[in-house]
Image (cartoon, rainbow, N blue to C red):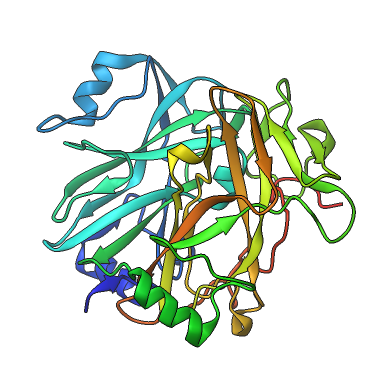
C-alpha cells in the first residue's frame, strides 16, 4: 500500500528487524506517522558540517573532522555555534522500496537547534535511500542557545514511506473542498500556501526574537524557563516587521491548519526568490494535527524564521512556506493529540515547551 507508514506498521517494522535500537526501541518513541530517534552516549565536536558521501562511512569521516569527544552519560552542554555529531541508538535495515526522511522535532526547531540526520554513504541531509542498512547519526548545531543534553533525548524523528504519495494540486483542492484544510481561502500552488500573521486579533504581540547572550537550556526541564530571559517580544501595530540578519524569530501562521487522519504533511520552503529568510526546521505535521476529533479544531502553525543576508520587511499575510500533503498507507491507530502527549495541539503563537506560559 503506497504512502507514509503509520504507527501500527512502524511497530511491524520493529518486530521484523527493519528498525532496531540499542537499547530496544520503546513505545513512547512511536508517533502517528514517525519514530522519534534517541541520542547515544557520546557527541563528537567536529570542525565543520559534513556528509559521508558515496561509499564512505560516517565513522571514517569523523576521524578526519573530529576535534574532541564529549561524554553525554551524565549530561553535557552542546555549545551555541559549534557543530556536533552524535551516534543515535537506532539503526536501520530498510526493505527495498521503503525510503525514509528525517526532521527535527517541533521543540528542537523552536529552540533554533539545527538537527539533521546523516548516514553512511549519504549525499543529502535527512534523506535515506530505499534499502539502507546501517547506523544513524544526528548532526547538531545549536544556533541561538547552548543546550544540556543526555543520552536517550529525542531531538529528531524519522518518517518512512512506501513509494510516492504526494498529493498534487488538483488532489489537494479536492481534499480541501471535502475536509477544509485551512480556514479562509486556500492558496494552492505546489502545496498549500502558509502565510504569516502580523495583525493579531488582540494586542500587538506578533512573535519572539531570540536574545543573543543567554544561559544554558536543559532540554529535560519542561515549563521551567522564564521567556523574558531568552526572548524579546516582537510587537507590531502596522502589520509589518523588519527581520534582522542573523536573528531567529518565532512567529505564527495566519491560517489554522488541518491534517486529516489519512494524511501527513511536511513544511517545505517557499521560493528563495520571495525573500532572504528560511522558515521552519520542524517540518513534520502528523495525521490529526488540527483535527476536531483529536482536540485540534484547526491549529495554527508556528513559524521558525531566520533572516539571512539583508534586513527584510515581512508583511502581514505574506506567504512564507507551503505544506506538502501526502497520503498515509493506512489511517494511523493513534492520531496527533488524541491520548498521546502532544504539546502543540490547538496552538497559537507558542514558544517551545521548555518555557513557562504566561
Q: Is residue 100 left or right of residue 182?
A: left
- 209 lies above or below 9: above
- 171 lies above or below 71: below
- 152 lies above or below 346: above
Residue at (21% x, 29% y) in the render: 52
Single out the residue that lies furthest toward the right: 203
The quadrant the N terminus occupies is bottom left
Return the x and y of residue 252 as percentages of the image width and height. Answer: 67, 53
- 294 lies above or below 286: below
Q: How many marks?
A: 0
Can residue 97 be seen at all in this image of the molecule? yes
Return the x and y of residue 335 as percentages of the image width and height. Answer: 51, 76
Q: Is residue 201 left or right of residue 27?
A: right
Return the x and y of residue 29 as percentages of the image width and height. Answer: 45, 60
Return the x and y of residue 165 as percentages of the image width and height. Answer: 28, 70
Give whichever of 215, 1 is nearer the camera: 1
Residue at (42% x, 82% y) in the render: 174
Give whichever of 335, 284 is nearer the camera: 284
Residue at (16% x, 56% y) in the render: 130
Give whichever of 331, 43 is nearer the camera: 331
Q: Residue 45's quadrant in the figure?
A: top left
Give whichever of 268, 91 is nearer the camera: 268
Amino acid at each position: 500500500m503506497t504512502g507514509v507508514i503509520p504507527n501500527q506498521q512502524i511497530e511491524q517494522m520493529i518486530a521484523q528487524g527493519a528498525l532496531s535500537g540499542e537499547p530496544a526501541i520503546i513505545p513512547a518513541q512511536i508517533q502517528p506517522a514517525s519514530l522519534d530517534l534517541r541520542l547515544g552516549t557520546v557527541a563528537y565536536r567536529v570542525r565543520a558540517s559534513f556528509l559521508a558521501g558515496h561509499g564512505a562511512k560516517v565513522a571514517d569521516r569523523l576521524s578526519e573532522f573530529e576535534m574532541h569527544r564529549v561524554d553525554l552519560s551524565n549530561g553535557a552542554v552542546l555549545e551555541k555555534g559549534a557543530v556536533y555529531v552524535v551516534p543515535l541508538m537506532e539503526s536501520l535495515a530498510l526493505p527495498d522500496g521503503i525510503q525514509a526522511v528525517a526532521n527535527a522535532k517541533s521543540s528542537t526547531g523552536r529552540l533554533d537547534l539545527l538537527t539533521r540526520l546523516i548516514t553512511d554513504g549519504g549525499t543529502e541531509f535527512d534523506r535515506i535511500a530505499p534499502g539502507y542498512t546501517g547506523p544513524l547519526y544526528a548532526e547538531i548545531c545549536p544556533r541561538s542557545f547552548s543546550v544540556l543534553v543526555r543520552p536517550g533525548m529525542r531531538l529528531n524523528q524519522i518518517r518512512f514511506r512506501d513509494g510516492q504519495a504526494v498529493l498534487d494540486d488538483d488532489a489537494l483542492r479536492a481534499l480541501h473542498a471535502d475536509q477544509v484544510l485551512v480556514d479562509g481561502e486556500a492558496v494552492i500552488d505546489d502545496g498549500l500556501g502558509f502565510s504569516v500573521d502580523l495583525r493579531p486579533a488582540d494586542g500587538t504581540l506578533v512573535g519572539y526574537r531570540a536574545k543573543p547572550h543567554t544561559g544554558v537550556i536543559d532540554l529535560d526541564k519542561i515549563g521551567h524557563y522564564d521567556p523574558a530571559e531568552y526572548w524579546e517580544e516582537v510587537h507590531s501595530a502596522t502589520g509589518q516587521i523588519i527581520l534582522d540578519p542573523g536573528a531567529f524569530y518565532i512567529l505564527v501562521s495566519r491560517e489554522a491548519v488541518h491534517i486529516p487522519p489519512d494524511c501527513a504533511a511536511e513544511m517545505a520552503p517557499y521560493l528563495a526568490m520571495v525573500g532572504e529568510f528560511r522558515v521552519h526546521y520542524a517540518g513534520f505535521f502528523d495525521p490529526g494535527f488540527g483535527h476536531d476529533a483529536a482536540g485540534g479544531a484547526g491549529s495554527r502553525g508556528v513559524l521558525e524564521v531566520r533572516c539571512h543576508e539583508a534586513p527584510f520587511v515581512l508583511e502581514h499575510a505574506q506567504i512564507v512556506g507551503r505544506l506538502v500533503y501526502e497520503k498515509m498507507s493506512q489511517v494511523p491507530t493513534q492520531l496527533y493529540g488524541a491520548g498521546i502527549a502532544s504539546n502543540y495541539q490547538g496552538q497559537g503563537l507558542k514558544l517551545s515547551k521548555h518555557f513557562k506560559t504566561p
